[in-house]
Image (cartoon, coloured by chain):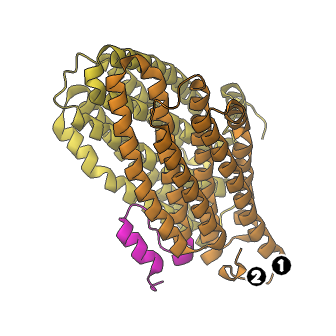
Chain colours: A orange, B yellow
Amino acid sequence: MDKKTFTQHISQQYNEDLERIVTRVMTMGGLVEQQLEAALDALVNGDQEKGEQVVTSDYKINAMEVELDEACTHILARRQPTASDLRLIMAVIKTITDLERIGDEAERVGRMALHLLDEDRRRSPMAEIAALGEQIKGILRGALDAFARMDSEQAVRVAQEDIKADAQYDSIIRNLVKHLEDNPKSVPPVLDIVWATRSLERIGDRSRNICEYVIYFVRGKDVRHISFEQMAEEATGDRR
Amino acid sequence: MDKKTFTQHISQQYNEDLERIVTRVMTMGGLVEQQLEAALDALVNGDQEKGEQVVTSDYKINAMEVELDEACTHILARRQPTASDLRLIMAVIKTITDLERIGDEAERVGRMALHLLDEDRRRSPMAEIAALGEQIKGILRGALDAFARMDSEQAVRVAQEDIKADAQYDSIIRNLVKHLEDNPKSVPPVLDIVWATRSLERIGDRSRNICEYVIYFVRGKDVRHISFEQMAEEATGDRR
């Protein structure tokens, strides 16, 4: 990561503590990415082993969230950070909550995939869901990259990608509704596909949240709950 | 609220700052409760005005989240809290995230209710959904009470109520699946009801999260991601 973005402290130990926390967030992010990858393999290709792996591995992400929360509390108590260091810790506390929930959504996709093992994958809009899955993987990766480099312009680009993914999601859901209307006998499996698709969309939203924390860290400005245009302006403008 | 649960500080101002933050969380919680109440009126009774009110009022909750996050960051920077004060601030930071998301789910219920204005409410399992809605209102109220009094035993009772609500949710979804199978022509409205029911279930889960933060504050122990039995033991045991 680009150490220039951090205040350098007289205490070498403090610098190391902060860097270690960011490294651990990236490790947690890597694990979440693996879970999403495996969940998509299970959903799109019917890979049972991957599906089971996702369902049985979520506890690792939960454990990392708890450990990182403790590490942040410890730094707050011991180092009493201010200014950008404090914003970094706040961004980490919020990011790990979203990463943990992304892990939950990936687990949900994995569980739905296990329900769907015996289904004919050509019947449902699986190609579109696979494409959405790739988009969402890119968004999560992009959000983690933005976090690692604390790059607010990258964060804006990722948020924009998520808007495109939402449109793709809407189109798939319309398709699935039509499918339900035409095939009343296949309601439970199609509904499982609806839930899995919904979880993918939620992962995009949560990745976008991470982008907002990056902008908060870099610009010192809370960009939640505002329009994309306002967010882009805050992230790239030179006020501060 | 029971001030005995807080460390009293030599600085009267510091005590007041902490108390003011808790009061603001309760104000935010009250607004979220109103939103849920209005969303349920819209869903169960087809009250259009209430539905529109929910959709147009969510911004107030979002604004409170941003303000409270700022207030917490300010206290962290200025007062550099430790021990139970720090745990309080951590619990607040996490609680307001969940309250904001509960607001989002209530808004979603309100939006679905607006889609369903012209539907015949006798057709769907609306009585069961109304009962679930009452349960969820009780759970949110209970979680906010536990937070206001920092009562970890109350937090455990609320978490147990949420387990019951999850079972009720499963039963309603099974009912709705059967309905979709029997009435392929009514897929879009029934799917809207599915989404609304799902949002109610999520509100229960998020209220339960708040209970976990209460136990974290009172007991100094992170009880996320463990079984209900373990959580109950941690919350009521006398270790510490």
Residue under the point 54% across and 58% down:
A139
Q: Nearer the viewer, residue A44 or B163?
A: A44
Residue under the point 54% across and 71% down:
A154
Residue under the point 37% across and 64% down:
A226
Instruction: Check if residue A234 falls in the magenta segment.
Output: yes
Residue under the point 36% across and 16% down:
B181
Q: Marks 2 and 1, how far apart in space?
A: 7 Å
Q: Which residue is mark 1?
A: A12
Q: Amino acid at mark 2?
A: His
Q: Position of residue B186 (x, y in %)?
A: 26, 23
Q: Is residue A49 left or right of residue A188?
A: right
| Vertical side of B9 occupied by B114: above or below | above
Packing grade of label 2 (10 A; few <14, some 14-19, many >=20) is: few
Secondary structure at numbered mark 2: loop
Q: Which mark is residue B50?
A: none
Q: Are marks 2 and 1 in contact (CB under 8 Å)?
A: yes
Q: Position of residue B145 (x, y in %)?
A: 48, 37
Q: Is residue B25 left or right of residue B4?
A: left
Secondary structure at numbered mark 1: helix
Magenta stretch in the rendered image: A216-240
Q: Which residue is mark 2?
A: A9
Q: Position of residue A37 (x, y in %)?
A: 65, 46
Packing grade of label 1 (10 A; few <14, some 14-19, many >=20) is: few
Residue A95 seen in the current view = yes
